Image: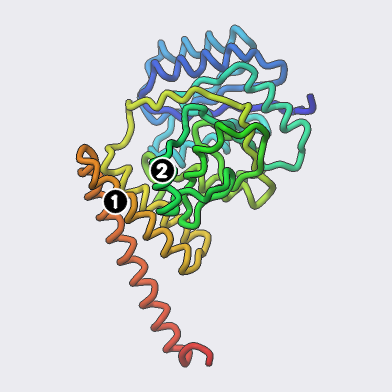
Amino acid sequence: MNLPRGMTVAVCTRNRHEDLVRCITSIAKESPDFPCEVLIVDDGEMPSSVRCTLRQLLDSCGIAFAYYRKRHPGLLLSRIAAAERAVHDVILFLDDDAELEEGYLARLAAWYGRFPDIAGIGGIDPSIRGNWKWDWFTRIFLYDSGKPGKLSASGYGGSMTKWASMKEPFPTEYLFGCNMSFRKSALLGLEPVAWLSGYSLGEDLYLSAWALRSGRLWIDPNLKVRHHQSHASRDKEEQVAYTEVVNHYYLLKLQQAGRWRRAAHLWTSLGLCGRAWIRKPWRHKAASYWKAIRFVLADDWRRLSRESVSDLGNGGPPG
């Protein structure tokens, strides 16, 4: 296995101590035969007894343990801190409420040893699957591109529901944040952005776009985790709904997306808002979606106004 500098498993956490112990236990069971460290990046308050338990679990299988307590909260800032402090040249970001399935680390290491030019590799959560109603909704409202590794026209990763049915690895434009890995070199210079704060919905798309500048990304459907989707320490549903629209809008701006993709994003946003309104228990989310849509429309109007003023100042658009 050609992985001379080993692997850092970075777990970004906030006050999910039981979930975290279960996650680290799954890592310890892997007993990797290459240099490996687990780096805990903590946004919360972790008792010394929990840290002691984690260290003992990892010491028993020869995995190094590192802990970093951050001053400023936010998942993207935790990712950046992990990339800066990782000892090894491959970083696996694993959610604190996820468990590795058997053989994950060995298979991942083999990927990086065999393909030195790839920038990153991601795995899947087999429980993420679509159904005919969801599939129709995502295609009509452009939430799903229809191709497993491709983002939709509006910038969403709805095609992830197809990953569990794939038999072979495939190239992709994005990785799934609960288990995504990158070469450390692919994340060099990774910058914080103001709109990815707190829960940072969409930060996995941001990291993926950054890493794509240095090489290809792949999904291997044989790299599997059990993602328990813990409700502890999550942002409120209303805030998540708002950022689901606004953060994808900012991602499109970052990519300098044209009018068609911005229009597609508006269409997807209206679909999400309408779906929440129709489902009575979700109506509180519909108000947040609508608030986000109004923000996007106002921001786009300001941008178009600035462009019009600029065109007038330059003598108008070319004839």
Q: Which residue is mark 2?
A: 201
Which residue sits at x=51%, y=64%? 256
x, y percentage for residue 245?
36, 52
Q: Secondary structure at mark 2?
A: loop
Q: Amino acid at mark 1?
A: Cys
Q: Is residue 86 left or right of residue 125?
A: right
Circle nearer the viewer, 2 or 1: 1
Looking at the image, is mark 2 or mark 1 earlier in the sequence? 2
Q: Is residue 218 visible?
A: yes
**Position of residue 221 measured from the top left corner of the image (x, y, whole percent):** 61, 31
> Would residue 266 appear left or right of 294 to someone viewing this image?
right
Residue type at tag 2: Leu
- Residue 20: % across, % down: 44, 19
Q: Which residue is mark 1?
A: 273
Q: Residue at x 79, y 28 (%)?
A: 2
Q: Residues within 10 Å of mark 2 (few under 14, many from 20)?
A: many
